[in-house]
Amino acid sequence: MTFKNSNTALQSHEIIELVRQRAENIFENLKLCCSESLLLVLNHGFNGGLSSEQAKQLGAGFCGGIGEAGCTCGALSGAIMGLGLLVGPHIKGGMRKKNFRQLARKLHDRFHEEFSSTCCSVLIKDFDKKSKARSQFCSNLTGSTAAIATELLLETRPDLVQRLQTDYLTYRDSKLTGFLQKIV
């Protein structure tokens, strides 16, 4: 599916909210994990250049706290990968390594401040593995992390607004869309 920038003038808080909502939509309806959802929404939302398949493949190993080991939350990992893709030191016009690492640390610290831990197993310890409550918690965490990452991206590089793909961010997948993608 191709999405274009509709050139709508949006305020940063509106952009942040669109990214948050789209990340939750992807997590819930496409049944992707938090890291896959985060990398996918940041990549497509800001025209990062990866295909959907590439973004999902890169994010897949970070699900459940790195291969379900329960370590660093996949939402945080996906957001860090998204930052690297969009403003990292190895892209044209990217940040210097030291500055990028400070940005990554800022994301880490904001995540920790909001959720009291960066460890997946600590974050989900009060939920049964297959429960709706856990899925809703992880969806909200995915959206909140997407919002934090977007806020930091826009603070660091306001020019990224020019790359914004509002049609992608306002699009909503349905559960049927997710089901059909799985069987095709």
Image (tube, rainbow, N blue to C red):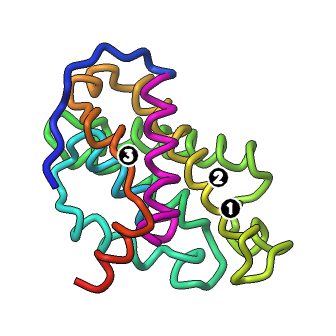
Residue 62: x, y in percent? Answer: 48, 74
Q: State the residue position of label 1.
A: 136
Kindly report which numbered mark, 1 or 3, lies closer to the viewer in this rendering. 1
- Does residue 47 appear to the left or right of 175 in the view shown? left
Numbered range of the magenta stretch: 14-35
Mark 2 vs 1: CB contact within 8 A: yes
Element under disc 3:
helix
Mark 1: amino acid: Gln
**Which residue ends up furthest to the right in the rendered image?**
126
Q: CA distance from mark 2 to mark 1?
A: 6 Å
- Does residue 112 appear to the left or right of 54 in the view shown? right
Q: Main secondary structure of the magenta part?
A: helix
Label 3, residues with CA under 10 Å away: few <14, some 14-19, many ≥20: many
Element under disc 2:
helix
Kindly report which numbered mark, 2 or 3, lies closer to the viewer in this rendering. 2
Relative to 8, residue 110 above or below: below
Between discs 1 and 3, the one toward the N terminus = 3
Element under disc 1:
helix
Looking at the rendering, in which quadrant would you find the C terminus? bottom left
Residue 122 is tagged as none
The one nearer the camera, 72 or 175, is 175
